[in-house]
């Protein structure tokens, strides 16, 4: 049976769960429509008449929900909304899968979900018949914020390729960063990550950039960026075909000539746990941006701002974060109309589907990320699903939240014979017959063994 039949997926529908679900060509195609919509926001009510958008927001939101709702209304459609888990049957224990079947059955033509669990939007997309858009799933991804960020940069700078961008703040928990960095890497940006100390970008996010887009990752000493470098643990990401020598002075003795954009994020306190002991607070204002290299630097922020950008920055021509928030309406109009099949993007091709095998199993290895949907309510009904990134030794990425696992043992589902994961015999077992285990103890407890 096809997986799509198994989960009730609708073949052919497009969802936006990760920014990697759109190709660069499609993103640029959406910008052209967004500009057209922006020309007169009130002139497009004939685009999607009679269409209903459901906004399910189980976490706070101002910009994302309201700009989606405004976008749908401006396209001539209507909106139904649930703005807290507490007001829906989720509070009675209903699963996301069942919510998807209901809302994504005959109630709405498209759904936007914001949810605290990583991978929640994928679950909704797997079970809903209509397109699903990820409006932010825990600290994982926020692809429509990235569309808004890129659209803003494209309008300001006139292009997206070869930009010099600095990402600041809580890079560990910011879902906006995890989506944005992937898109910037695809458009060949030079990226410098300047995290609050202790809030560095997760290594699996960087490793994925290396593997998928051929980015080069280097540790950088950015002590020569007074004002905007609070921590020392900076990371420097360059495209596989660098368009210039390195950006920062301590790397290859180059001097920074220009910085196109600084993207600031707030400390994501709601996602920080006991392990998050870092500090390194930053506050950005005109006094830190006096040098020549900051002359044309645009300052972006997904908002809400707490105090990481001073209020006296707001009057500075380089501050574009309020314009960025406004751009959320036309770009979301373009996205909604596209997913509803109302726009053609001039032959732009979708991203190539991954050829990596999918490993699905109700036994053995589970995702180790505590806030992954498969360890939360999904425990009741989801089975583990991983992309097999590498075979020998195996490297698996959770299909819900992207967390990477390196299982030490693999067993044969039928014979129950166990192999070390780095043994050649392991790769000869067809992926459908494999059961991965984190360690030997887990394998033995599940009835697998070497001597069988
Ligand atoms: C962001 C989010 O929710 O991740 N906000 C937004 O959608 N504009 C950023 C944040 O909350 O810090």
Image (cartoon, helix red, strand yellow):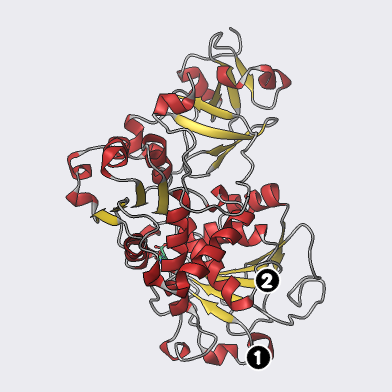
Identify the residue at image location x=20%, y=47%. Answer: 88
Marked residue nearer the N-terminal end (1 or 2): 2
Q: Residue 1 placed where, x, y %?
A: 47, 18
Q: Residue 89 placed where, x, y %?
A: 19, 42
Instruction: Tell me where residue 407 sits by quadrant.
Output: top right
Q: Vertical placement of 327 versus 360: above or below?
A: below
Q: Quadrant of ligand 1?
A: bottom left
Q: Are marks 1 and 2 in contact (CB under 8 Å)?
A: no
Identify the residue at image location x=38%, y=76%. Answer: 306
Q: Label 2's element? A: loop
Q: Residue 113 placed where, x, y %?
A: 35, 51
What label does residue 291 carry, if any? Answer: 1
Instruction: Tell me where residue 314 sits by quadrant.
Output: bottom left
Identify the residue at image location x=43%, y=79%. Answer: 322
- Of 233 and 287, nearer the camera is 287
Identify the residue at image location x=66%, y=71%. Answer: 159
Left or right side of 72 for 266: right
Left or right side of 50 for 208: right
Q: Label 1's element? A: loop
Q: Residue 397 placed where, x, y %?
A: 56, 39
Residue 443 seen in this snapshot: yes
Residue 116 seen in this snapshot: no
- Of 332 and 392, nearer the camera is 332
List the residue tagged with mark 2.
163
Query: Badge 1, how many Cα within 10 Å: few under 14, some, many 20+?
Result: few
Distance from disc 1 to disc 2, alpha carbons, whole Å, reads: 19 Å
């Amino acid at each position: 049976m096809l997986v799509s039949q198994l989960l009730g997926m609708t073949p052919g529908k497009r969802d936006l769960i990760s920014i990697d679900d759109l190709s660069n060509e499609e993103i640029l195609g959406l910008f052209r429509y967004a500009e057209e919509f922006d020309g007169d926001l009130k002139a497009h009510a004939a685009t999607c008449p009679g269409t209903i958008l459901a906004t399910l927001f189980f976490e706070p939101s101002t910009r994302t929900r309201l700009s989606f709702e405004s976008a749908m209304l401006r396209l001539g459609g209507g909106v139904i909304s649930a703005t807290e888990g507490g007001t829906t049957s989720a509070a009675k224990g209903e699963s996301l899968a069942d919510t998807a079947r209901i809302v994504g059955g005959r109630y709405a033509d498209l759904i936007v979900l914001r949810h605290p669990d990583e991978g929640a939007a994928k679950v909704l997309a797997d079970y809903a018949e209509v397109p699903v858009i990820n409006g932010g799933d825990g600290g994982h991804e926020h692809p429509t914020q990235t569309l808004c960020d890129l659209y803003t940069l494209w309008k300001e700078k006139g292009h997206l390729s070869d930009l010099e961008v600095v990402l600041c703040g809580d890079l560990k928990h910011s879902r906006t960063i995890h989506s944005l960095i992937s898109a910037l890497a695809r458009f060949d940006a030079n990226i410098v990550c300047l995290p609050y100390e202790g809030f560095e970008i997760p290594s699996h996010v960087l490793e994925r950039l290396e593997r998928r887009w051929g980015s080069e990752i280097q540790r950088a000493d950015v002590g020569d960026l007074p004002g905007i470098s609070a921590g020392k643990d900076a990371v420097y990401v360059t495209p596989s075909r660098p368009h210039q020598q390195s950006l920062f002075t301590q790397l290859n003795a180059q001097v920074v000539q220009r910085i196109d954009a600084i993207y600031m994020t707030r400390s994501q306190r709601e996602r920080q746990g006991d392990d998050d002991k870092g500090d390194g607070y930053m506050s950005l204002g005109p006094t830190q941006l006096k040098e020549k290299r900051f002359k044309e630097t645009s300052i972006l922020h997904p908002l809400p701002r707490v105090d990481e950008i001073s209020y006296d920055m707001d009057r500075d021509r380089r501050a574009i974060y309020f314009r960025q928030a406004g751009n959320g309406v036309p770009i979301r109009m373009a996205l909604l109309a596209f997913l509803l099949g109302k726009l053609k993007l001039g032959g732009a091709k979708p991203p190539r589907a991954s050829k990596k095998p999918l490993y699905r199993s109700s036994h053995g290895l589970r995702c180790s990320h505590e806030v992954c949907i498969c360890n939360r309510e999904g425990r009741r009904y989801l089975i583990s699903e991983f992309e097999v990134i590498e075979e020998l030794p195996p490297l698996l990425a959770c299909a819900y939240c992207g967390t990477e696992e390196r299982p030490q043992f693999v067993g044969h589902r039928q014979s129950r014979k166990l192999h070390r994961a780095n043994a050649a015999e392991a790769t000869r077992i067809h992926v459908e017959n494999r059961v991965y285990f984190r360690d030997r103890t887990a394998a033995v407890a599940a009835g697998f063994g070497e001597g069988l």
